[in-house]
Amino acid sequence: MPKGLLAIIPARGGSKRIPEKNIREFCGQPLIAYTILAAFESKIFNNVIVSTDSSKIKEIAEAFGAEVPFLRSSDISDDHTPVSAATVDALERIDPQGVEYSHVCQLMANCPLRTSEDIINSYQQFTATGADAQISVNRYGWQNPWWAYEREDEFILKSLHEDMQKMRSQDLPELFCPTGAIWWAKAEALRKHKTFHIPGKSGWEMPWQRAIDIDTDDDWKLAELLFKLSGEHDINKH
């Protein structure tokens, strides 16, 4: 019998910058609901799991159909633990023998604009590449890191890439920013490496409008605006 696909949505309760971010109302629904619903609408997952340390998040996630079979330990729910640790923990709890799932998809709850089609298309590319892991990315635009500066003191700036400063934007090497929207890994590789940052990982490019990670109040306001615009205009093209 073929192994299945597992979606894991990490959602801890201790958000500092936006309190209770994952269940705060976003355009009419709790933020986490958009990720749960996109996972179900993709129709490719055998199970959709939420990993949380919060009974309040558990209750809301279950109301939208997700499974929350356990509350995760506080040891992997602090500000310093990589999100992937919670995903690996969930995989090992749910499938301790490694016989149920071939692939794992980590979907961050603070990326509400990713669609079910994005999930499907990213999976198709992932399986086509044969890589052990794949992360979602968006292409850098006018805020290009090649032109970045750091401060030497209160006034003086130092270029991080002096040789790139005089190059035209169209001549610069393309750079991509990771987004937490859709990360895939082969289950066996994730168990082995304990991270999605596996050598040779591939990148699935998505439009920045749907790739946004909400971490600050400004991010939240921008995401709400993009969500409202998406119902009136086509913002979904590259």
Image (tube, grey):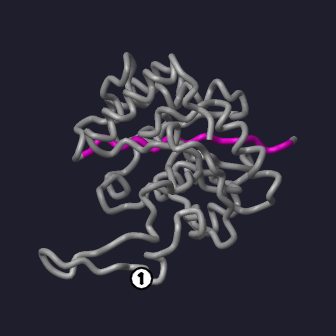
Image coords of residue 62 (percent x, y): 47, 24
Instruction: Pinpoint residue 70: horizontal percent, then vertical percent.
Output: 45, 39
Q: Quadrant of the C terminus?
A: top right
Residue at screen point 79% across, 44% down? 3
Mark 1: which amino acid? Glu
Near-viewer residue (175 or 28): 175
Disc 1, SS: helix
**Which x, y percent locates residue 14?**
26, 45
Q: Is residue 130 left or right of residue 111?
A: right
In front here: 195 or 34?
34
Q: Is residue 14 magenta?
A: yes
- The outermost residue toward the right is 1
Magenta highlight on residue 153: no
In this picture, is 237 found above or below 12? above
- Asked if 49 appears above or below 159 in the picture, the reply is above
In-image side of 145 versus 12 (left or right): right
Q: Residue furthest left?
A: 154
Count the labels in the image: 1
Point 55% across, 60% down: residue: 176
Give the residue drawn at x 65%, y 24%: 41
Q: Which residue is mark 1?
A: 162
Q: Which residues are magenta?
A: 2-15
Instruction: Give the image quarter of residue 54.
Output: top left
- Depth order, front residue of 86/226: 226
Residue drawn at (51%, 73%) of the image: 167
* Percent of width and height locating residue 9: 50, 40
Residue 235 as seen in the image, left or right of residue 165: right
